[in-house]
Each structure stands twice: as C-alpha cells, then as structure tokens.
Amino acid sequence: MVDSTNGLRLTRRTLLGLGGAAAVAGALAACGSNTGRETTPSAGASGAAGGSKPTLQQWYHQYGEAGTQQAVERYAAAYKDATVKVSWKPGDYDQSTAASLLTDAGPDVFEYGNGPTIDMIKGGQVVDLTDTIGSARDDFNPSLLKRMSYQDKVWAIPQVIDMQMLVYRKSMLDAAGVQPPKTMDELLAAAKALTKGNVKGLFVGNDGGAGLLGGPMLWSAGLDYLTEDNKFGFDDPAAAAAFAKLRELWESKAILLGAPKDWFDASALTSGLTAMQFTGLWTFPDIKKGLGDDFGVLPWPAMPGGKQSVPVGAYGSCVSAKSKNVDAAKKFAAWLWIDQTDYQVDFATAYGFHIPSRTSLIDKATTLKSGQAADAAKLATDVGHAQSPLLWTPKCSTAFGDMMVKVVKGGADPKAEIATVRGVAEAELKRVLA
C-alpha cells in the first residue's frame, strides 16, 4: 500500500489507516484494510484449462508482496469444479470494481475492502453469502463479520486481518520509569516524560493523528460512529472530550511531527525518533529486525468510562449478482475461504505479516505463536473494532475527516464540529435506510 516515499498506494495498509472502502469511494481514498500489502505495476489473468466446467472470473487488487499473485493462482488452479481465472487489477481497484458490478463485464468473485458497501447491498449488486458461510460464521473475527453483515445476512467472507496498535520501546520506558499506558491521561503523561532532546514521546502520524485516530478516540470514550440501531453515535460530551484530548496531545510538544516516513512505517520507532508509535502489524518484521525484543504492544488507551481498542480491517470475498454462475461462484468462495484452511493460513502469513480471519486458525500460524505477535493477535480478537460501520458512507467519512483536522490541528470547538458531522450523517442514514 505505501511505498518507500510518503505517497499512498491503493492497498491494505491505506485501507486500514483511512477507514476502508467507504473512504476510498469518497476520496479515492486511501485505501483496511486495512491495508498491509503493497501494490505492483503489473496486471494479468490466469486460470486452469476448462472443458465443460464453468469459468469464473476472480478479481484481486494488486498485492506487491513477493509470491502473493502466484499463491492465489495456485489456489485457483487447485479448484476442480470450475476454471477460475485470476485477474490482478491495477490502479483504483475499489472504484473500478464498484463500477464493473453495474455491467456484464465484471467479476464473478471479487475482494472488496471491509466487504461490499451498503449501496452495493441495497442495490442488489452482491449475493447473500449467509448459507455459504454456514456454521463457520462463529469462527470469524466478530467485529469484521459484523462489518460485512446487514440485516443478519452475511455479504462477504473475511479473508485475512490487518490491524493497528500502539508499539513502544521497552528500554526507553524503563529508563524513564514509565509504565505502559492504559488510559489517555497516562499516555499524555508518558509522552511528555519520554520526550528528551531529539526524541519525542509519541508518533501517531505526521498530522498528529487527525487522519488515523478518530475511531480509536471514539471507542476510547465508549462510543462509536453509529449506535446499534443505526443512529448517529457521538453527539456526546464524552466524544468532545476525547477529540479535545487529541488536540491536547498536538499542543503538548511531545508528539513527533514531520517524520521522514509516516505512521505506516516503523522507522521512526526503530531509528529512535520516538519512544512510542501507533502503527500496523505489517511493520513487525522491520521492528524485530531493528530492535530485537526491545518492544511491546498495547491497545489504544481508554478515556474515562471507555475502553481500550485496536482497529482491524480485512478484504472480504464477495460474489457478484450479475455472475452467470452464481451458485458456482458461491461454491468456489466457500471452498477457498472456508474449506481450505491451509491456504488461508498461507495467504495470511507466508507473504506478509497478517492474521487469519478465523479465530481457530490463529494457533496454526507459526508467525503468531509467541511474543509480541501473539499479543497483537489476541488484541485483534479481544478488543478489535472494524474501522467504521457498514452504514458510515463516503460522505460521512469525508465530513468526519474534515472535523478531525479542524479540531486536532486547528483547535476548533469539538462540540460544534460534531454537530456539523451529525447533519451530514443523518442525511446519509435517511438516504441509505429509505
């Protein structure tokens, strides 16, 4: 998703950092994910020879991790009940895929960031996969499966999980006599205590967390974008206090700004520019290489009355309603993402650092068996939050992002800015629920 510069590519890390496919559709956004696999500039199709079997078109966005394309081609070739042609799709994958679903030239099976959008579901563009997922439903990460469900029907099968969390240098905290923070007040105090000379206490992105921490701040206050009954979820003094706390961090002079690489890269932590960093699981190999075991992982801290959390994201496998072979497409999706557990572990762990979306498979992932990686995987299961709800549309995401910048960087009144977002969100809810 992100290259060696500070530019954005359209993949999993950006998905996770910017709120998923809703953000992508809204701003070409940057996208759960979140979200962890980089893109490459080649595209193509491949598949087994056919006979009289149905032919299925399966689409992926371009992953850049070595071996990923060959892996999914290998999975497809192993399927005996259809000829599956895998296409690597370049560029603006989410928007081009969404457009293709309105035509006869789209895929049969395709992945989409955090599952299909509410407009795809309500527009009849994707197929209900509730029966397809069957008894495996309870084995998937609950937050992500909820994100891919609507009216108690499942519309996508989560593939693999990416996540973000707070990572800290153990030696730096020990030297300063600082305990790993569990609350936002403790985080602010720790960041100040760890700021010495050229070292800042905390790095949450070069925008001070405005683009990254809106959701975690809501969850830290015990709130969410929407309520369980799909009403606006944070017109609450606790939300205003949470966003104001992020502004306080901005003003504290204890956060790193202007790092050579942004939050999605761990070099600020490994090079000693910061003692704590909010980043993604995909950075663990680089952190391990640079620091050995001199790091620990934490969820994002809680505000009073709230809870700790970590954002999680995943591409979901969907079936197009325009497929000429819907039953065959559903059968293949089930075979790959439910039945073939070895392939699922392989895809999650052999070509990058990710988590299987099924809880029962985490123990089979050797990369997640111990240490910081095992701690992170447990956080994803125990306190993971999908980046945003299904009904949080692109317009909602844009308004929310504008609010965060105004509050965090500009010092705007959180209460007034929340009211503005509420107006946009309620209009969108009225539209999608009509």
Image: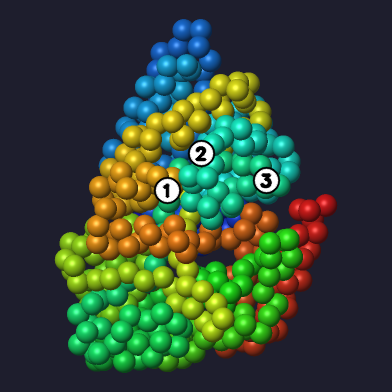
Query: Which residue is nearer to you in this view: 268 or 194?
Result: 194
User: Residue under circle 3?
Assistant: 152
Q: Are marks 2 and 3 in contact (CB under 8 Å)?
A: no
User: How crowded is the residue under tag 1: few (<14 C-alpha within 10 Å), some, or many (20+)?
Assistant: some
Task: Name the residue located 62 percent from the left edge and 42 percent from the top edge.
Answer: 154
Query: Taking the image as drawn, is residue 15 in sight?
Result: yes
Any part of residue 42 in sight = no
Give the mark, 1 or 3, whose residue is nearer the N terminus.
3
Contact, mark 1 vs mark 2 (Cβ under 8 Å): no
Q: x, y percentage for residue 335?
A: 46, 28
Circle 2 sits on which residue?
A: 136
Corner quadrant of residue 123: top right
Give the alpha-carbon distance from disc 1 to disc 2, as whole Å: 10 Å
Number of callouts? 3
Secondary structure of the residue carrying tag 2 is helix
Q: Secondary structure at mark 1?
A: helix
Look at mark 1 in the image and give the residue it sits on. Answer: 359
As drawn, the residue found furthest toward the right would be: 434
Give the residue type that dot 3 points to: Asp
> Of marks 2 and 3, which one's residue comes earlier in the chain?
2
Q: Secondary structure at mark 3?
A: loop
